Amino acid sequence: MNFLETLKKSIKSPDLRKKIVFTFGIFIVFRFLAHVPVGGVNTVALKNLFAGNQFLGLLNIFSGGTLANFSIMALGLGPYINASIIMQLLTMVFPKLEELQQEGPSGQRKINQYTRVLSIPLSVLQSIGMYALLRSQGIIDVLSPLSFISFALTMTAGTIFLVWLGELITERGVGQGISILIFAGIIGQLPVVAVQTFSTITPETLFNMLTFVVLGLLVISSIIVVTEATRKIQVHYARRVRGNKMQGGDSTHLPLRLNQAGVIPIIFAVSIVLMPSLIANFMLSSKNPDLVVIAQNINTWFAPTGIFYNIFYFLLVVAFTFFYTAIVFNPAKISEQIQKHGGFIPGVRPGTPTTKYLNYILTRITLVGASFLGLVAILPEVARSLTGVQTLLLGGTSILIVVSVVLEVFKNIESNLVMRNYEAFLK
């Protein structure tokens, strides 16, 4: 089923049409609140700060563009994303959380509730850190305790409200709500950036712009291929006699995705690789000349246009991809589940040999997926060097999120159409 056919059928379906309209309604609410500013903030100085700081630029992406405007939802979904990552890590540490995760939808709802609760203190801490940062840069002039409390409460409430909007989309709309809101924030910034880029086009830069567009299409195609790529491992189930019935004897496959970790490794890596520059910017305002010299050296080494920065960034993405894949996919547990249900991989003995085989396959495909993610991460600098286009950066993280969300929504619509056809058949 192609995209246009799926879109036509979804519009004709009353239930799907209602879900799509509801999702767009949440988009409108989100974009409206993204322009409601917090009081006492110098927005002109804030935009200048974001223009010279890539770390804050990344946070602005995940806030849906609300951080640069410093709206009431300026923290965005960052605290909730951090809470989700922490809960995933805790699931590997605490057996009770792992058992809860395996209980199905009811257990997942409980974990989601814990994630929402954990995002509240994280929002408070992040709002305090944001207040301290803006105060140090002279962007907030008010010093009263009441203004500080009001600032922190507003930021925290904005994040919780944004999480609630995302859950409404998940429940009544199409796709996963949190991902769609991040997608909406990225897409919402594209028209402004596109106008700025096309206004600078001259006959001399036209070829570079066309090269940039072609490169972007190639990257999008590559992301789709890698996102959808799977390594299918065949699994057979032995026949078993229970009473007078013969069970088993079926054959299926275990799909191993080429990119098991998604965009999470890039988020981890960019937070670390940009941290030295963020610290160095604070050290530059020091009265100690030695600290100033150290800060200048750090900025030189970790300049986004430098070779060291991009190599270090690439290696971090690869390392975090292996780390996160090891968390979300455990070959020993998969082998145990296969053996428990009477299954086996042809040519491989059950138990430890199956675990080693799965680990061998997973390592090989993860190396390919991790290398691809690393290339996507350093793509902006590569694109800028090849085309000379400075105003429209080919943000690898942004493109990866946009393409992944579009594929997810497309699959969600297709599954709803299939369910609708089955319901019509049963009637």
Image (cartoon, rainbow, N blue to C red):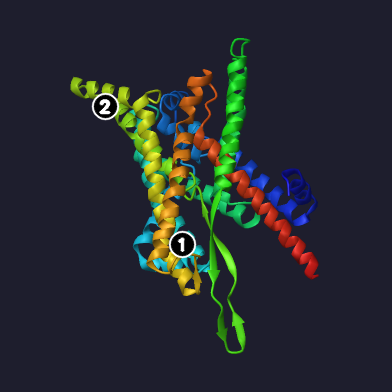
In the displayed structure, would residue 224 be above or below residue 91? above
Can residue 174 be seen? no
Can residue 300 be seen? yes
In-front residue for pair 73/406: 406
| Alpha carbon distance from label 2 to label 1 | 40 Å
Q: What label does residue 111 carry, if any?
A: 1
Question: How many neighbours does mark 2 have within 10 angstroms: few (below 14), some (14-19), or many (20 or more)?
Answer: some
Q: Quadrant of residue 332?
A: bottom left
In-front residue for pair 353/259: 353
In-front residue for pair 257/60: 257
Would you say 383 lies left or right of 187 here? left
In the displayed structure, would residue 106 be above or below residue 359? below
Label 1: which secondary element: helix
Residue ID at (58%, 25%): 193
**Residue 82: x and y, percent?**
42, 48
State the quadrant of the C terminus: bottom right
Residue ID at (37%, 67%): 95
Q: What label does residue 283 carry, if any?
A: 2
Q: Quadrant of residue 92?
A: bottom left
**Residue 255: x and y, percent?**
54, 57
In the displayed structure, would residue 420 be above or below residue 325? below
For badge 2, the amino acid type reads Met
